[in-house]
Amino acid sequence: MKAVSFELSLPRLAAARIAGFFSPAGFVAPFGPTRLLDLPDPRPRRDDWVVVRPAVTGVCGSDIKEIFLDADLDNPLRALISFPHVLGHEVAATVIEAGPAVRRVRVGDRVAVSPWLPCEVRGLPLCRYCEQGDFSLCDNFTVGDIAPGMHAGNCRDVPGAYAELMAAHESMCFPIPDGVSDEQAALADPFSVALHAIRKAPPRPGETVLVYGCGPLGLVTIHALARLYPGARILAVDLHEYLRPFALAMGAHDYLAGKGAELIERVAEATSARVRKVRLALPWVTGGVDRVYDTVGIAATLETAVRLVKPLGTVLLVGVGTPRRYEWTPIFFREVSVIGSNAYGAEPFEGERQHGFTYYLSLCAAGRVDPTPMITLRLPPLRASATRVVAPEPSSRPAPADRRMAVIDRNKRLVGLVALSDLATRTRRREQVGEIVEGISQPSQP
Ligand SMILES: [Zn+2]
Ligand SMILES: [Zn+2]
């Protein structure tokens, strides 16, 4: 099968860093760590495993950070990752093979795949966290006959969904109800992340909440808040004006673009709070918002968030930014709770304990949520470019089908990977390639 693999090799990392300095496409150059490779087809690991064919795969912020080498070496999660691995963990797929002990799904079923690899997937007795449904807190991500890995997409032994095929334990498969599209199902992972975070500190009726960041995670958080907590007022914040229509379409009541002191003043105005100015430092507010859902999770957003939240308020840390120093005095002075939130599991929703995926898919089936208007770019399936016949080049350079190019949005964020052969079918002139990428990189209107 064709698959996008990430290899941890110092020469490849160094080459990508140098090439990436000149162009974002350098990070996915053939000599870099992220490549399209031919790998053996995956097989069911045990009798209770299946093989699925991904139909739609989302590009997660963590994939983008990995491809663009945006991480520090002191990150402790490195203990829970093994290389090389096939990326991709937001996936809707069809079951094409089922082991003899599989009961939960059948060949031909459409499924949303939860990528997590806790005790049950590893064939181990359940640890205390898996017992209570907190699969992302499992004790055993490094134990058993599967290489260390939190989830498919960062584990050497369980390839992710940037591939033509993927193997999964049956407990990872959630049947997609009729009437729910593959695109909706592929958003089960980010939506469940948002549901889990909101449930840790849900807004009470009449409260004002702020969603920091309007990337995919921010937009699904806005959507979940708007549809499930209609009594709350939702302020959405990001740097760029062009995200306004997306935030409003997902259900935000107001959108504020900006950062730092300017943003703090805007939020103060929107919440009738008073600004406390401080010489040579960021201002803070008296009053402000009741809760902040920080889907960016970098020093700048945390520093701003703890200045905008009311005394005794809550900041939910959902985004996975690279840590840096920030000024956190308001946390103790105003007794702010900063709560971490990681992924999802089985938890009470509307009085019934269920997996986040099950709850999300039922919300889609009932027409209560539909986050798909936030999708800005639809790339051709991996196999379409992989099976295209490409004439071999006279030089020893890789065939064009093996060249992947990053598609960057206006915020310099990766929104997809395109094979150069996809573009070559439209133009033979190199200078037009840039224009085409520019064209498909424009976020569409919701
Ligand atoms: Zn993710
Ligand atoms: Zn466990």
Image (cartoon, grey):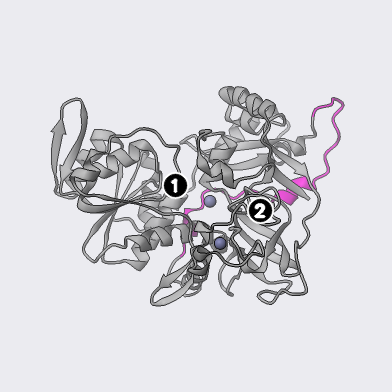
Decide which of 429, 138 is in the foreground and name it. Answer: 138
Q: Image height check: is 243 above or below 26? A: below
Query: Is residue 131 found inside the magenta-colored segment of the image?
Result: no
Residue contact between numbered discs 1 and 2, judged by CB atoms under 8 Å: no
State the residue position of label 2. Answer: 161
Q: Quadrant of residue 81?
A: top right
Identify the secondary structure beneath mark 1. loop
Q: Nearer the viewer, mark 1 or mark 2?
A: 2
Chain-order first, disc 1 or disc 2? 2
Q: Residue at x 41, y 72 (%)?
A: 349
Q: Is residue 159 visible?
A: yes
Report whether 394 appears left or right of 108.
right
Q: Which amino acid lies under the numbered mark 1 shown in the image of this protein?
A: Gly
Q: Residue at x 74, y 72 (%)?
A: 107
x then y, percent, for residue 332: 22, 44
Q: Is residue 250 visible?
A: no
Query: Is residue 381 found inside the magenta-colored segment of the image?
Result: yes
Decide which of 342, 403 is in the foreground and name it. Answer: 342
Q: Which residues are magenta?
A: 370-397
Q: Image height check: is 38 above or below 135? A: above
State the residue position of label 1. Answer: 215
